[in-house]
Image (spheres, rainbow, N blue to C red):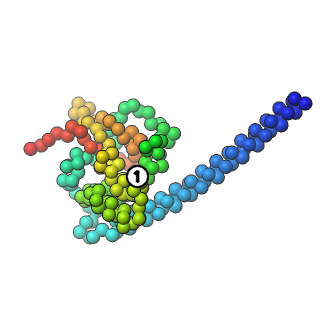
């Protein structure tokens, strides 16, 4: 009799585990579909924002005094050193920078924000684009600008001995940038040499 009870409990546990697993797969599929449609919608908004620019603001990278004032440079990922190297995958994200959020802002940086910043766009102009296109404060272009060019920009110090940049923060963004195949990131250089 005890064997029968134990067998039934084991069967119930296995049945419950299969139900939970099925629910998790359904939720994962829902999230993937939601993220896919959200990404498509966001990409359409980004393309519309770019098309709405006057022709005089064609997206041709230029030397930008605004970036110099901000102390920002586009730095090759291979030259960025970060310690500790504790970001191994999506499981190491959370809190302030959830994995999906970092991916979202990295896509916006690459597709829209960086080209516009290279044309001299400022936070005020990104806020106006967000307002025009109904983008939220959390997922909008101004938020991406702030994360990469504003108060939350990645900060690093240049090491002339190794020709690399030692990052003080930005490990999550660096991980996602590498994962997405980007070759550089905007970085605020804290010890930029001053030229007269």
Q: How would you rate the neighbour count of disc 1 (Cα within 10 Å): few for under 14, some for 14-19, many for 20 or more?
A: many
**Which of 42 and 2 lies nearest the eye of the viewer?**
2
Residue 90, visible in the rendered structure:
yes
Which residue matches tag 1? 105
How far across and how far down the image is residue 12, in percent? 79, 40
How far across and how far down the image is residue 95, in percent? 46, 42
How far across and how far down the image is residue 82, in percent? 35, 35
For the point 42% across and 55% down, the residue is 139
Q: Secondary structure at mark 1?
A: helix
For the point 9% across and 44% down, the residue is 196
How far across and how far down the image is residue 75, in percent? 29, 44
Quadrant containing the N terminus in the rendered view: top right
Image position of 142 (left or right of 73): right
Image position of 95 (left or right of 143): right
For the point 26% across and 36% down, the residue is 157
> Looking at the image, is 178 positioned above or below residue 143?
above
Residue 75, visible in the rendered structure:
no
Q: Quadrant of residue 63?
A: bottom left
For the point 56% across and 54% down, the residue is 32
């Amino acid at each position: 009799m005890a064997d029968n009870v134990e067998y039934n409990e084991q069967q119930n546990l296995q049945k419950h585990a299969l139900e939970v697993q099925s629910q998790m797969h359904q939720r994962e599929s829902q999230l993937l579909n939601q993220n896919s449609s959200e990404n498509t919608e966001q990409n359409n908004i980004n393309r519309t924002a770019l098309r709405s620019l006057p022709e005089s603001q064609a997206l041709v990278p230029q030397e930008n005094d605004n970036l110099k004032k901000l102390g920002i440079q586009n730095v090759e990922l291979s030259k960025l050193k970060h310690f500790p190297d504790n970001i191994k995958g999506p499981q190491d994200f959370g809190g302030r920078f959830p994995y999906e959020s970092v991916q979202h802002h990295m896509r916006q940086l690459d597709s829209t924000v960086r080209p516009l910043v290279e044309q001299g766009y400022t936070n005020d102009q990104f806020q106006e684009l967000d307002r025009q296109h109904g983008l939220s404060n959390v997922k909008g272009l101004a938020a991406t600008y702030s994360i990469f060019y504003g108060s939350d920009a990645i900060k690093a110090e240049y090491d002339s001995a190794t020709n690399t940049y030692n990052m003080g923060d930005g490990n999550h963004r660096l991980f996602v940038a590498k994962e997405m195949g980007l070759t550089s990131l905007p970085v605020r250089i804290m010890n930029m040499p001053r030229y007269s």
